[in-house]
Image: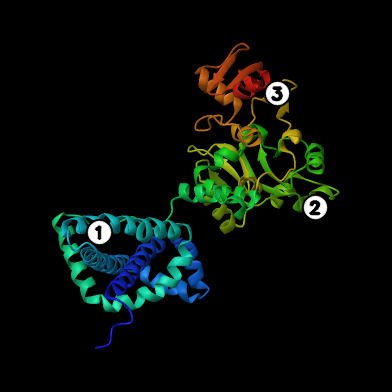
Amino acid sequence: MDELPISIDAILWIVLVILILCSAFFSSSETAMMSLNRYRLKNLVKKGQKSAVNANKLLKRPESLISVILIGNNLVNIAAASIASVLATRLLPENENLALILSTILLTIAVLVFAEVTPKTIAQKFPERIAFPASYLLKPLFTVFAPLVWVMNHLVGSLLWILRIDTKSGSSDALSTEELKTIVTESGEVIQTQRQDMLLGVLDLDNVSVSDIMVPRNEVVGLDLDDDIESLAEQIKLSHFTRLPVYKGDLDKVIGMLHLRDANDFLFSENPSKVMLKKATIDNYFVPENTPLHTQLINFQKEKRRMGLVVDEYGDVQGLVTLEDLLEEIVGDFTRDILFNSKDLHEQNDGSYVAEGSTSIRDINKTLNWKLPTEGAKTINGLIVEQLESIPDSNMSIIVGDYVIEILQIKDKKVMTAQLSNKKKQKQLDL
């Protein structure tokens, strides 16, 4: 009888190495499939990439996928342990107990290093490179292991039912607003900084209401029909705005909104009258002050409007909001340099800022990258009154978090100007 060209021991060693490689395949496949970016995967599926389509089909049945991988992994690991024991007893026939102990220790180390830690680390770092090719091998294994998977899934389902664990109410792949913000913020060089700011602006629309961005009532520029004809004509000619509210005596008695292009008949008429202005106005568009910005953006689009009067729960006009104000929350201010073009905020030589009492806190936070509280008061005057819980009657300083606010001027029970400084920034300058 001819001798075998290769010994039994060599064959066992070859089979053992193959089994460890198979174990590495199953381990890396599991990690890679579960580490795939689901949103990138869906995008590749839309593009028709075949390997992505295969992987996506497998991930639609995660319980079965895990069962197939675990069955395969356990089978090869058990087979590897059996062969390792046979090899150990053949190498140390005089001491089988020592041989089994050594085979267990050495095989455990080999499996951990070559079939678990190393392949899983690589798979976690390069999930697509591992998962996509692996999907072609895992797909036929679904058919081979189908009976075992069916039995296992039913056993597991029964056990979970006994433990009263509901698998149908598991976590969803849907991302919350805060999670989306984190993704955008950590996108790094993938998305330009300007585009990041725009995306974050869109996501922040839910947290901002119309009252946060409106032009306050005392700053609304409009046409009072109680003024004489000459004064009204002069206001229209010198107006920096294309749309003006028209009212009689008080902003709460608003008649309508006037687009300056519709005022030509009034301006160039030989006998202009206030009736001509009334006829040129369009109906008022009122906006509740607590309307979220994302809702108001849609409302502007539906109503084909660019401007609305903001009213409180009693119907009193609180201010005015424009489409431009809303868009600035997304794309940023349209002016190049907000700080130096601002009439309400002036930088001082010592690093502090002088602001008018009516300056919006949100504008200050955006301009200076500060974090003054915005939950309650909307202006510096309102913030000071809120902190003091009374109307200040003399110049004083208050501390709000990391910021110092010093009252510079008070008039008609209102803070007209205040000096703002950042304590942390001031300490850095002192150092």
Give the amino acid type for the residue marked by disc 1 in the picture.
Answer: Ser
Quadrant where the N terminus sits is bottom left
Label 2, residues with CA under 10 Å away: few <14, some 14-19, many ≥20: some
Give the amino acid type for the residue marked by disc 2 in the picture.
Answer: Asp
Query: Between disc 1 and disc 3, whose residue precedes?
Result: 1
Picture coordinates of residue 423, whole percent (x, y): 60, 21
Q: CA distance from mark 1 to mark 2?
A: 101 Å
Q: Which residue is mark 2?
A: 265
Q: Which residue is mark 3?
A: 351
Query: Between disc 2 and disc 3, whose residue precedes?
Result: 2
Horizontal placement of 374 versus 247: left or right? left
Question: Colour mode?
Answer: rainbow
Asked where in the image residue 94 lies, by quadrant, the reply is bottom left
Viewer-closest of 83 and 379: 83
> Is residue 376 placed above or below 283 in the rendered structure?
above
Horizontal placement of 64 versus 416: left or right? left
Q: Residue at coordinates 55% horizontally, 17% vertically from top-left?
A: 391
Disc count in the image? 3
Q: Secondary structure at mark 1?
A: helix
